[in-house]
Image: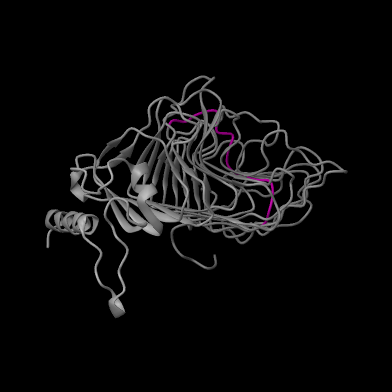
Amino acid sequence: MNRQRWTLAVLATVATWACGEPAAGPGGALRPSFAAGGVGRPSVLVNPNSDDNGTAKTIQEGIDLVAEGGKVMVVPGTYVEAIVINKGLTLEGIGGEGGPVIIAPSGAPASVVEIATVEPVTLRMLTVHVPGIAGIRGIGPVDLTVDQSTVVAVNPPLGASNLVFVANDAGGGSRARMVVRHSFVDGTVTNRPGPYPQSFALRPQGDVDAVFEDNILRRTGGACIFVVTRADLGGELNAEIFNNDIDECHPLGRVSAILVGPVAGNLPSPTRPLTATGVVNIIGNTIRNSSAACVTTTAIVYEVYTGRIERNRIVNVVQQCAAPTGRNLQGGIWLGRLQPFFPAVTPTVRFNDIAGNAHAGLRIASNQTVVIDASCNYWGSADGPSGAGLGGTGDAVVVEAGGATPIVTPFATAPIAGTGATGC
């Protein structure tokens, strides 16, 4: 059956459900009525051109009609609405070649898709236009999956904004879940002088378990991925950042394409220590700076947690014109923090291609008093990394005063990130 016939069959089946009378189930029990005014429906079709036969005309109406854990299926078109999802469900665009399902509210609402339930919510095959400060947002212990979708900023306002954002800062042991995979997220910020919108593409914050996999992230005015410590600098955050294609991050704060740490100004002190724990793995990503923007000081800044930074391609990201910031210095990968009272981070940094970056390939902050394993990386040369006492003609490994020199040998003599090698 071809795609068009399959789509017509699905629409006909759902329309039949919507119009059908209660039917006898096992033992003669009546099934729920799917007609208007009946109990929650396991499936609801959203079609603005329906003839009032029980099919929803808006996405919000479909959400209101569907049963907990059900599916809302939306035919192609542009839906001028912001929506609130207050129950567990799957919201999915259908129609295939018929075109996209675009959620494009008027004005600049606080969020376009607000997740207001702790039950699992999946958004699939949707296009979300974001004119305000948040696109898809969940606050608290939400369970959000975004799959095969597009989230695009549209005339974003100046100031901070988030395209996909989950924040769980309350503590108390509850955890949020945030999964974004096979999606395209575009902040639409071009390389130009500031000020410009400081948008973040993917942002988990607080007690969250996050997975970001096989996404394309582009043109943000903040970090493309910002993994944020809980507001009180405690709690546990875990993130798996795998196989993403990241380019043209234009962070207004000049920090990095991937940033792992607290928000600006949220600093530890002797009476307010940073106790946050977690594992953040950054593996198999390609990070580029195609527009040669000077505002990208670093590809990866890793200030908190432990984990693996492995098999990434960080090539020509940091330009000669890049400048230091208040929290980090120029380099392909920066470990640690310039401010005091930050404990050392302990990731392994292996099997990466770190080449063509000005200033340094790997830079170790003064607070990094723990020796890390940075072996088996390719530095753009068969001679290994350059820098003080290390020789070679590739990118430098620079250790700030007080920091511990990492283990860099053996090093890869050719590009290694995409090879699957387990040694060098």
Color encoding of the figure: one colour
Q: Where is residue 417 drawn, in percent x and y?
A: 48, 57
Q: Magenta region, mostly helix, strand or loop? A: loop
Give the total number of marks visible in the rendering: 0
Decide whether residue 302 is among the magenta residues.
yes
Q: Where is residue 165 drawn, in percent x and y?
A: 53, 43
- Looking at the image, which residue sits at the far bottom? 27
Q: Is residue 130 left or right of residue 162?
A: left
Q: What are the residue bounds of the magenta stretch?
A: 291-306
Q: Is residue 155 left or right of residue 362?
A: left
Image quarter (top left, top right, bottom left or bottom right) of the N terminus:
bottom left
Location of residue 360 by image quarter? top right
Q: Where is residue 131 drawn, in percent x and y?
A: 43, 28
Q: Does residue 147 show up?
A: no
Image quarter (top left, top right, bottom left or bottom right) of the C terminus:
bottom right
Q: Is residue 140 left or right of residue 292?
A: right
Query: Closest to the observer: 221 or 311?
Result: 221
Q: Is residue 150 left or right of residue 370?
A: left
